[in-house]
Amino acid sequence: MPAQTTSAAVSRFTGPAASLAAFLTALAVCVGDAVARTFPFGPERRGVNDLSNQFIPYHAHLWDLVHGRTDGGLLLNWQSGWGSSFLPDLGTYLGSPLALLVALFPREDIEYAVYTVTILKMAAAAAAMTVTLLRLRPGVWWAAAVLGASYALCGWSVIEATYNPMWLDGLIAFPLLCLVGEWVRQGRRPLIGPLVVAVCWVGNFYTAYMATIGAALVLLVRLAVVHELRLRVVVRAVATVLLGIGLAAPILVPVFLGSTHAYPGWTNEFEAASGTDFLARLMPVTYSFSTPAAFVGTGTLLLAGALLFHRKVPRRERVLWAGFAVAVALSLQWQPTHLVWHVFATPNGSPYRQTFVLCGVLVLAAWTVVSYGWPGRRALLGGVGVVAAVGVGAVASEEVTGWSYPLFALGLAAACGGVWLARRGKLPVVAAVLLAGALVGQAAATTAYADRERLGRLDDYPAWGAEQGRRTQALGEADGWPAYRTDSGREQITGNEPMLFGGQGAAYYSSHTPAVLTKTLAALGGGWTSRGRNLQSLDNPVTDALFGVGARWRGDRLVRTDPDAVLPLVTVRPEGAAAPRYGASPFRNQELLLGASVYTLPARGTACPVGSEVFLWAPDFRGTARLGTGGKKVKMTGELPKRRAALTSMGVQERAGDVVALKGQRGKKHEVGCLDSSRLAAAVAELKASAPVSVDVTDSGIRAELRPGARGTVVVAAPRIAGWTCEGRPADAYGGLVATRVDGDRTSITCDFRTPGLRAGLGAGALAAALLAGWLLWAGQRRGKPPVGVPDAPARAELARTA
């Protein structure tokens, strides 16, 4: 097929081109994972960091939600963090329509489901870019497919986003939003444009924000190329984006407010990558957190490098696209523009999360070259010179591996051969195989290398197996919600075990982990990682009693608690009892929330009373602790502020004189508490005597039938996160928990949860829908009205009849 393809031919080949791009992408990733023997193609673990800590558990929760098996609903998640807001998590981690596909898999195959969704997202990004390329300018369909696949297989995608699947929605969004920009430029599809924007922003607002910036810049370049930089087009583009964001507001506003109520995460200072490292990341088989993974395949780099030398491309277009690509690359390295790309905050982990936009721009530049005809000798030599300069500039970088240069050179040779054959119209199939094969080989090798490197550099977690199945079954059989909670255990495999294995525990890990939950759990002796965003379960008889934990996984088995030893979900504290004001000691804080003294705090170096259970609180201690000489060794993993060690049981004091000995890196403070189980039992019995007669829990609230004449403070064993109301007014807080006053005149109390921002988001969405409808109506009337001096359709028909 000639380089200059007609619009009709483009339409005919768009489907096959998109399918080929999707196939090449899936093939490269699967081959790479198979070479690395990574799940699901081998024994090596795929679950690292947030993939196992967040995405797999959240998709498991989505599976349960779709199948009606969750405790809670769209607004309230009763399983995590003793009761957390779910809509912000849904919008952050599960907004993609493709996420729903996990419901088609068996629950025990949730890891296979997430892997499949990940591959489908990358394939969808390849298809979307291919379609966009062919819509921007006609050209060789199979070349568009190879370039579309090179975008989806960029280093950012196969190295970083593959274990953060929500980012892949931004990979899909960029070409789609570029396509919307083209519709805006042409004045077409005023309805579909805002809807596409809305879907992109719901899928993942964070990367959609970056994709929107990138697509807006692409539109400006397109307008400048054809001298159409007009105000009305810019206004139409802004209106399209704002209407789309408005339509997504029912999700976006709760997500935004969820972030404002979250416990503060890490604060990082941006440091630009060195020039040599920046160039090295354009090559295959490199890996790093702190540099932009801008690999797009040597063939794409060759074509993009040939742009300035390709005389068939108009000079203005060459300069604009080349300058645009360089400007985007430089914007990644300059702190002010870095902050703009990242919503004015340097992110934790990878500081180059906008790299996929740069990769997309390089692909667009390469397509500009191809769409005007395959580059000749002069342009091809210029492209080779650019690629060679990248290779030479990267020599001093430590990011380069032993495979980088051989694959780089082979890819360059194959790409040059493919372009040479395509230029002459000879053996087009061989040309396509050379270009596609070079891309697939380099991308598969990069994928395999990244799979192995992640296991050495990141925390990894076991895949779902028989042990996880046994644990899930045991927790399900013990479930007694809402009569009591079932906790998935203190020794955690992932940060969101309640969603993955079941139960209703304290463990919770999210970008929206509420500050009130983190502070309350810390005050009671809880532990964390990720600087307070990843909260751990707290295995302690007092907190189990306070939060109604009647069964928990401990070690390798399920342990049930005497029903008389735990409180119901709702209790009534006596009139006049002041709300707890927590101090430094978690033992005293537990007593304040319980309303009774149950601990003895021995002086440093002295022992607990015989028969009491000994607890160690050493939040910053890293090492091992032991009670006496015969006690079990307990591992502590404190390292404040990143990690906080939880209050831990050292066992029962069996001999007088045994004290807790620490071995390791001592923290600034530690404290020992001696729990008297008889005093705890008496305190629980006293609270149960005044507890409500019955408690009913819904997907978004709780209702309790009170005893006649109940007076005091009703306390719900759930964190007082923003959104709780009781009897139509904002709930009070009692030691960080949901509470409200009763004065003897009520027989029941009802507390409801509404996600903060939901009402405002629905209002904004309705307004955006109304404005969009009005815009469409106005535009339709304008199109139906003939220009001044031109007869309308009936008049034209009459003139034709009488002529």
Image: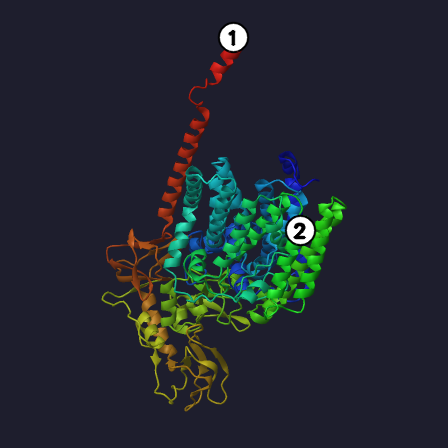
Dividing the picture into quadrants, the one containing residue 293 is bottom right
Q: Amino acid at mark 2?
A: Arg
Q: Residue at x 72, y 46 (%)?
A: 422
Q: Nearer the viewer, residue 312 or 88?
A: 312
Looking at the image, do the residues carrying marks 1 and 2 touch, with CB atoms under 8 Å apart?
Answer: no
Which of discs 1 and 2 lies nearer the camera? The answer is 2
Q: Residue at x 37, y 89 (%)?
A: 606
Residue 715 horizontal side relative to residue 165, left or right:
left
Residue 405 horizontal side relative to residue 289, left or right:
right
Q: Residue at x 35, y 47 (%)?
A: 760
Residue 104 visible, this angle: no
Residue density around tag 2, few if under 14, some if 14–19, many if 20 or more, within 10 Å: few
Name the residue carrying label 1: 802
Q: Amino acid at mark 1?
A: Thr
x, y percent for residue 636: 47, 79
Name the residue carrying label 2: 378
Q: Is residue 285 above or below residue 778?
A: below
